Image (cartoon, rainbow, N blue to C red):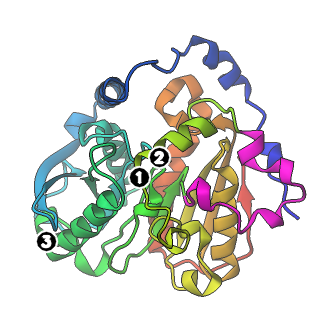
Amino acid sequence: MADFSQYTAPIADWVALEPTLPAFPNVGLEDLKHIVNKGREDMAAQGVADRGLAEKVHTKDFKIPARDGYVLEARSYRPANVSPSHALPVYIHLHGGGYLFGTLGSEDAICSRIVADQLEKSFPVVVFNINYRHTPEYKYPTAWNDVEDAFVWFHENISEVGGRGERSWSGYRGDNENLAACPRIRGQVLMIPCLVQLDYYAPRQDKLRSPELSSLVGCANAPILPIDRIKLFGSLLDVNKDSNTGDDRRLNPGNATAEEVKELPPTTFGIAGNDPLRDEGLFYAQLLNENGVPTDVHVFPGVPHGFRRYGDKLAASSKRWDEVMTNGISWALSSPECGSFEIKSE
């Protein structure tokens, strides 16, 4: 029986950092969205400047038509010293933010870091950042439809993005991995993934040694993403509870059956130890592994959901986060075989 509670206790770096952080804004939803998005964009701009990424990475913006006529934003990032005529594998980036937060610019730092880090590994890639629509203005399944439409457009226009069709590689990052529904891909990187909505979270709980060991219990009041905030994010999706939503795999991929996951591509997981979403990520990784999907599973002990935003203030954990993401890209393209289930925590 499983017990992942050893990953919960805060590490020293987090204990030192937490008292210095501002309180979550006590404002209305519209103001909250503006404050958080502005903060994320400012942090991204600072991250680009700190590493001189603007000189290393060339960006290009795209407009993508959605099925309802709305025009989606997307941005590509490629090594500045690689000729535009040189087609590269593509990593597709979907940001986290509880379906509420996130903009195109809020992802500039992480997307540029991936490009720069891959280049240092002598494995250049293009990153393609898709900005789907958000709540509360747009309910479920708008964001999911946006991602599907953008993936179709991407595969039809891969040369315009600078991608190499026969080796294009798509990945997902952030806590919105249940947005994934697309043409055949080479691999996935699921970082701090949200895989099951709270109303439908239960099928694998019986694998725990004891119910109180669940991350939904032990991490209920965790920093950054406590249970109350998860409930807020879920409520804004305005899902029709009278429909058969529990069986909707777009909304709840973590509840997939063994048959449904056996053809998935190699998947890297990055999971925060002090995060209510921890157990669903680990159980999903185990499900994939048990059904022949190559998995590379990493836990970051003692840090909460979204910890990477604090960068050098959590230096060791942030450095490892970047390594997990970049290594996940080259690992997936190496055609790995499925081994035994292993959780790497350092």
Badge 3, how many Cα within 10 Å: few under 14, some, many 20+?
Answer: few
Identify the residue position indicated by label 2 in the image.
Answer: 235
Badge 2 element: helix
Circle 1: element type: loop
Viewer-nearest of discs 2 and 3: 2
Q: Quadrant of residue 150?
A: bottom left
Q: Find the magenta span and give its range.
A: 195-219
Say above or below: 107 vs 298. Answer: above
- Residue 141 counted in the magenta span: no
Residue 213, magenta (yes or no): yes
x, y percentage for residue 206? 82, 66
Q: Please state the horizontal and vertical placement of residue 119, each as a whole percent of the image.
A: 34, 52
Circles 1 and 2: CB atoms closer than 8 Å = yes
Marks 3 & 1, CB-CB < 8 Å contact: no
Q: Percent from the top left, x then y, of residue 175?
A: 48, 50
Residue labelled with disc 1: 238
Say above or below: 245 vs 199: below
Q: Is residue 163 above or below residue 108?
A: below
Badge 3 or badge 1: first in the primary sequence:
3
Distance from Cα at disc 1 to Cα at disc 2: 6 Å
Q: Type of residue at label 3?
A: Asn
